[in-house]
Amino acid sequence: MAGTVSRTSNVGVATGGESSQRRTSRSGYIKAKFGFRNYWYPAIFSRELTDKPVGVRLLGENILIRRVGDRAMAVADQCLHRGVRFSRKPECYTADTITCWYHGFTYSFTDGKLVEILTEPGSSLIGKLALKTYPVSEAKGIVFVFVGDREPGDLAHDVAPNFLDPDLEIDGIRDEVASNWRLGAENGFDTTHIYIHRDSVLVPGNNLALPLGLVPGDLHGISVYGENEPKGVLDHTFENYQPVFEGKIDGQTVARSKGIGNQKIVAREVSIWMPGMLKVDPFPDPSLIQFEWYVPIDGERHMYWRVLGQRVSDTAEADAFHQEFHNRWKSLALHGFNDEDIRAREGMQEFYQHDKAWAQEHLFKPDRCIVEWRKLASRHNRGIQPPANG
Ligand code: FES
Ligand SMILES: [Fe+2]
């Protein structure tokens, strides 16, 4: 794995209130309600995109994507005449244009330029106005859009290590979740939240040795990759935590892991990478890696991407993986396990919708991974997305 590693020994998790030092170290993160600018984000699965334009909302920006020939292209989904969204009623009369349904302003997808106005031929505005265009890149069956002002960098800098490995076959789903994107990222990277998964069908269904919780050992097994790209935080969960299989109140067992005695060990390492991509290796089976994104739609919603990867050596193995994904993993793992995560994030949104919540929470020792992620994201982001209409 690329990057400079600093092994963390003390992250200063507060047990109540908060110091000004702690506030400063994560202030960029707290401001990033609409996400971080100047990164590649997954916008839509390749299989969802045809020559019919599709509107997506990323970080509060409305974007229209379409295939032009064999390339995916993206422009701002807002007419320059009176501001309506093209995606409300997309009109495409040629392979490379979008015509606004309201008064017929027609723009090129390639460079965004106003090329015709159907209701005023020869208008003096033609050639003088242009929509913002967005860089697009397609990889692993996913269409990525670069949101920002800088020259886009290498896609490999903005995804988790190994995601782009040529032998890794990918399949997945995406769903809208009614919570801020940071609650998604922190839910995914939170070691102790496995408590909510204790009754998941995946535990008996795939023979997983899943404890109720994980208590960090004295050696804090967190590596911070802050110099090279991609930048991220890796939690060596398996090496450094003591599993908890029974929950007790007054010495009486009130909750017990249904994974006691099960064989398969998963989630040996959990890591999160800028601008907010999780990697759980392996999961939900020793043969698979789970990747997730929590892409900001706006300040209150995110697009939750659940993607599995399996190493394959030929097309027959790739086909078998996709079949097993659809027949087994999608329902047993992605819904059977991760739908609980959606409920948890939506349960957090009421509290965290107010920015003062970040100063009112009371973190405990296992939250140190979340603290490290907040610090990394505050220090190393390429820009903070301003709130839409703000
Ligand atoms: S608003 Fe689009 S053409 Fe008038
Ligand atoms: Fe989870």
Image (spheres, helix red, strand yellow):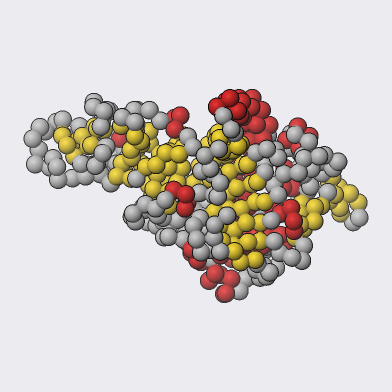
Residue positioned most to the front: 313
Foreground of the two, 184 or 169? 169
Residue positioned most to the bottom: 20
Choose top left, top right, bottom left or bottom right for residue 233. bottom right
Quadrant including the C terminus: bottom left
Q: Measuring 42% from the left and 45% from the top, which residue is drawn there?
A: 58
Q: Measuring 75% from the left and 34% from the top, which residue is drawn there?
A: 206
Image: 161 above or below 85: below
- Residue 186: percent from left, percent from top: 60, 53
Foreground of the two, 341 or 327? 327
Q: Is residue 223 left or right of residue 36?
A: right
Q: Is residue 310 left or right of residue 93?
A: right
Would you say residue 223 is visible in this rendering? Answer: yes
- Residue 389: percent from left, percent from top: 36, 52
Choose top left, top right, bottom left or bottom right for residue 114. top left
- Residue 327: percent from left, percent from top: 64, 25
Image: 94 above or below 252: above
Q: Is residue 110 left or right of residue 135?
A: left
Quadrant including the N terminus: bottom right
- Residue 125: percent from left, percent from top: 12, 42
Would you say residue 181 is visible in this rendering? Answer: no
Residue positioned most to the right: 251
